[in-house]
Image (cartoon, rainbow, N blue to C red):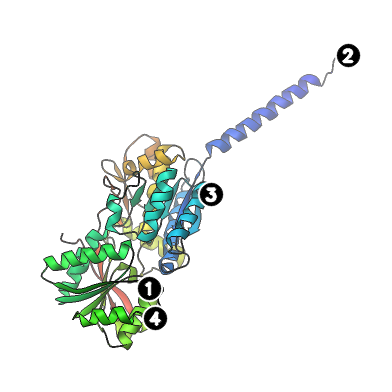
Amino acid sequence: MMRNKKGPGRLAGTLVFSASVLALWAGAAWAEGAKIGALIPITGDLQAYGEVSLNGIRLAADEINAAGGVLGGNLEIKVGDTQTNAQSGIDAAKKLVSIEGVVGIVGALSSGVTIPVAKSVSSSSGVAQISNASTSPVITNLEDGDYLFRSVPSDAFQGVALAQVAKEAGFQNLSVLYINNDYGEGLAESLDAAFGKMGGKISASLAYEPGNASYRGELSKAAGAGGEALVLIGYPENGITILRQALEEGYFSKFIFGDGMKAPEIIDAIGAQYLDGSSGTAPQAMSDSEPAQHFAKAYAAKFGDKTDKPYHDTAYDATYVLALAIEKAGKADGKMVRDALREVASAPGEKVFPGEWAKAKKLIAEGKDIDYVGASGSIDFDSVGDVAGTFAHWMIENGQIVTKKVFEPKM
């Protein structure tokens, strides 16, 4: 029988080919990367804040990917539109987890969406969720399996900040209209308690339902109670309607706003001549810090300008700390990522700032502790996933939103 002289050559070639395939497969498996979800209101009442939050998320991902990525691959962002609606938010979150395969979620913005998502999706699916804008005090004690965090301080603090701003403006008697959800109710209650301790009086505190054509009934009751100014706790879409009707009917001419109304859209819709002198509060970092300055410059360079709206820096930080936790965990596993969140954002550890992904990645690889200090301030999660923070006292002057000071509320 004649021997096939090509046999050994074919075998060798097959082995070389197989080794190459295995090498490629191993490389692909190692270059795992990770996906996180952006649960953002592209539509609905909080649409005005959705775009800037998404910008913050994408800026963080771009910086991370440019400096080596996560787990040897890219950090991918998958977007779900909450429509500022609880059921839509739940549906979007389920798709992000079960279809897109995300290992963490940034969002939602509204507390009224974040809470049901945490209860029915992230906690049951074992996926860490960091809200960049949900401030309701209800979140602090929520039964969420320790899967819900936030990079923005609770309204337990903002209510005190709002009360201080009102007192400094010389008001002794206020009327409050708040959106009927967890955010509105929580901030209104916090303001009521804090303003009372400062010797002030809340003459009326009334909930309003979003989506109504008229709020004249609520405004009439609020004005009849004798408040010197109207505190409006809500969002731009319905807030604009309330402001317009308050002015048209002569119910109020002086206004104080919660953070949900810090948007240039309200000035454009109502007119600077009617809103100049109005004040408000919103979570904001000390602008002279190195992390805040890096973020401001990077955001302006990428998106063309700064923004007066809140929550883009907290969205950036939520994305950054999720990515750090994934890198620390060593794999895209929900529980492991959750357990690593406090490790990468709390002392002790070497300080890591925004834009220092390569440094952080190297320290993690060396087995060293890190402490991420965010663009929005400390992201030192406490035992329930909350963070402390500072607030801006902002004012509308000559049709522009101007930060008067950044301060820590005196509890």
**Quadrant placement of the N terminus:** top right
Cα gap from disc 4 to disc 2, whole angstroms: 91 Å
- Sequence-wise, the earlier of marks 2 and 3 is 2
Q: Foreground residue, 180 or 367?
A: 180
- Sequence-wise, the earlier of marks 1 and 2 is 2
Can you identify the residue that label 3 sits on?
Answer: 100
Give residue 171's position: percent from left, percent from top.
16, 77
Q: Residues within 10 Å of mark 4 (few under 14, many from 20)?
A: few
- Sequence-wise, the earlier of marks 1 and 4 is 1
User: Please, which residue is most extreme toward the top here?
Assistant: 1
- Sequence-wise, the earlier of marks 4 and 2 is 2
Residue at 17 percent across and 68 percent down: it is 164
The disc placed on residue 85 is none
Can you identify the residue that label 2 sits on?
Answer: 2
Q: Amino acid at mark 1?
A: Pro
Q: Foreground residue, 141 or 402?
A: 141
Can you identify the residue that label 4 sits on?
Answer: 268
Cα gap from disc 1 to disc 3, whole angstroms: 31 Å
Mark toward the viewer: 2 or 3: 3
Q: Foreground residue, 210 or 17?
A: 210
Cα gap from disc 1 to disc 2, whole angstroms: 87 Å
- Sequence-wise, the earlier of marks 3 and 4 is 3
Q: SS class of the residue under badge 3?
A: loop
Cα gap from disc 2 to disc 3, whole angstroms: 57 Å
